[in-house]
Image: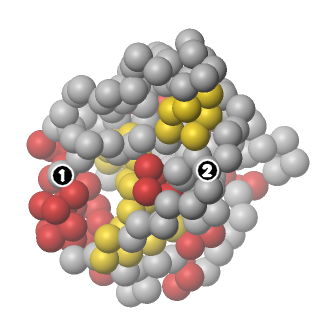
């Protein structure tokens, strides 16, 4: 694993590792990991002078990078940051038209090295964090909808990652964590912007 912490990592809140019980799987929805790094370094939380990112990133080649240590709270999913580890898979997703109604389908499959190393990483994390017991996708935790940028009358999902091409049954069987899904509730619109 390659460790390359974000420039603001010391400003992220510390947390006890035994409070972590959830892994959230994401995809970057960007063309490559270099672009994801640029997004991760952006300071979007002005009060804390930090950005949005996951803890780990897995390139299409399978290479794993740690951008945030697990004893720090990374900003990667609404409402679950303090109890979770965010793992981002390098994947274009809906890039560059995240919020167009005619560009919501994710077409590129995840690579075998990515998926194999994702399983390896989670199994290492399970050994290091006994409280880890659940796994979910970003799309299962953030169900908000917003008006499509090309057709405001059409509501689209804000988050769709890791998407329908992610092999959930095979993956959960390989890691031994309980799949966690939030119930569908009233979805209120939010303003559009880059994913994160």
Label 2: state its secondary structure: loop
Quarter residue 11 falls in: bottom right
Q: Residue at x 62, y 28 (%)?
A: 147
Q: Residue at x 39, y 26 (%)?
A: 104
Vertical side of 183 occupied by 100: above or below? above
User: Is residue 131 left or right of 166 when viewed as pictured?
Assistant: right
Percent from the top left, x then y, of residue 180? 39, 70
User: Is residue 101 left or right of 173 when viewed as pictured?
Assistant: right
Q: Residue furthest right?
A: 47
Percent from the top left, x then y, of residue 47? 87, 48
Q: Residue at x 24, y 34 (%)?
A: 60
Percent from the top left, x then y, of residue 51? 68, 42
Which of 171 and 32 lies nearest the eye of the viewer? 171
User: Is residue 101 left or right of 78 when viewed as pictured?
Assistant: left
Vertical side of 95 occupied by 165: above or below? below
Q: Residue at x 78, y 44 (%)?
A: 45
Q: Are there few (<14), some (14-19), or many (20+) residues within 10 Å of tag 2?
A: few
Task: Give the CA separation, mark 2 to mark 1.
Answer: 26 Å
Q: Residue furthest top?
A: 150
Which of 158 and 83 lies nearest the eye of the viewer? 158
Which of 61 and 119 lies nearest the eye of the viewer? 119
Q: Residue furthest front?
A: 153
Percent from the top left, x then y, of residue 18? 52, 85
Give me the disc on residue 167.
1
Label 1: state its secondary structure: loop
Vertical side of 146 occupied by 150: above or below? above
Q: Give the position of the C terminus as an image quadrant.
A: top right
Vertical side of 102 occupied by 182: above or below? below
- Residue indicated by mark 2: 187
């Amino acid at each position: 694993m390659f460790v390359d912490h974000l420039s603001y990592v010391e400003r992220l809140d510390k947390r006890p590792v035994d409070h972590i019980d959830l892994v959230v799987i994401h995809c970057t929805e960007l063309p490559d990991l270099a672009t994801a790094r640029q997004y991760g370094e952006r300071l979007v939380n002005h009060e804390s002078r930090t950005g949005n990112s996951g803890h780990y990133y897995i390139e299409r080649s399978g290479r794993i990078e740690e951008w945030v240590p697990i004893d720090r709270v990374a900003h990667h999913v609404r409402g679950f940051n303090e109890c979770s580890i965010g793992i981002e898979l390098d994947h274009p997703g809906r890039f560059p038209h995240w919020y167009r109604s005619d560009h919501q389908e994710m077409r590129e499959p995840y690579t075998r090295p990515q998926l194999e190393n994702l399983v390896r990483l989670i199994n290492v994390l399970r050994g290091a964090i006994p409280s880890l017991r659940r796994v979910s996708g970003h799309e299962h935790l953030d169900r908000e909808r917003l008006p499509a940028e090309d057709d405001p009358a059409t509501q689209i999902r804000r988050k769709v990652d890791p998407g329908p091409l992610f092999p959930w049954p095979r993956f959960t069987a390989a890691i031994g964590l309980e799949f966690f899904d939030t119930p569908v509730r009233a979805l209120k619109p939010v303003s559009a912007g880059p994913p994160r």
